[in-house]
Amino acid sequence: MPYAAATNSTATALATTTELACCTSPTVLVPLGVYQGMSIRGTVNAAMGTAGTTGIVRVRQGSGTAGTVVGAPMTVTTAALSLYNFPIDVLDTSPTGSSTYTLTFAQGGASGSDGSVKFATIEIDAVTSY
């Protein structure tokens, strides 16, 4: 079964409510006649800034923040100046033949350029049925 994983342990500052690409998976070549979709799991560890009220995790197709959002974003109410793990688990029912995914994070309610992503990890698996 095609599988890939990646981890980014470089701390990255968050700028207000701007969505940040945290971790991008390696490309997985998927024989579409055999596999029905891709299961994507990830976690973002982030320190909220002084005004952050929510943490928003998304999975996007491709590299960066411009790709199509896969599944529903995970939105969690947070307290300012606190550290959180934000998990997400989604299923891409429309993968391409070569699939790459990016885990992204944004703070809701943030007004300054404080807060940071401490690390992020993403795993993808091809699935035969769902």
Image: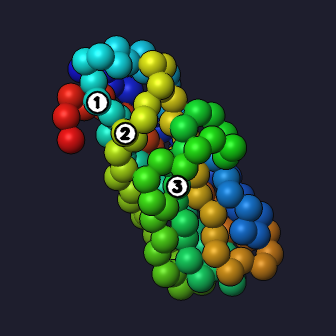
Where is 122 relative to 14, above or below? above
Name the quadrant of the N terminus.
Answer: top left
Name the quadrant of the C terminus.
Answer: top left
Check whether the beta carbons of the residues at disc 3 and disc 2 lie within 8 A of each other. Answer: no
The numbered dot on residue 89 is none
Tag 3's secondary structure?
Answer: strand
Mark 1 vs mark 2, CA separation in Å: 7 Å
Tag 1's secondary structure?
Answer: loop
Is 129 on the left-hand or right-hand side of 75? left
Q: Mark 2 points at which residue?
A: 93
Closer to us: 97 or 14: 97
| Residue type pointed to by label 3 | Arg
| Residue type pointed to by label 1 | Gln
Q: Name the residue under label 3.
A: 58
Is 15 on the left-hand or right-hand side of 122? right
Closer to us: 14 or 70: 70
The numbered dot on residue 36 is 1
Q: Residue at (35%, 45%) from the top-left corner?
A: 91
The quadrant where residue 117 appears:
bottom right
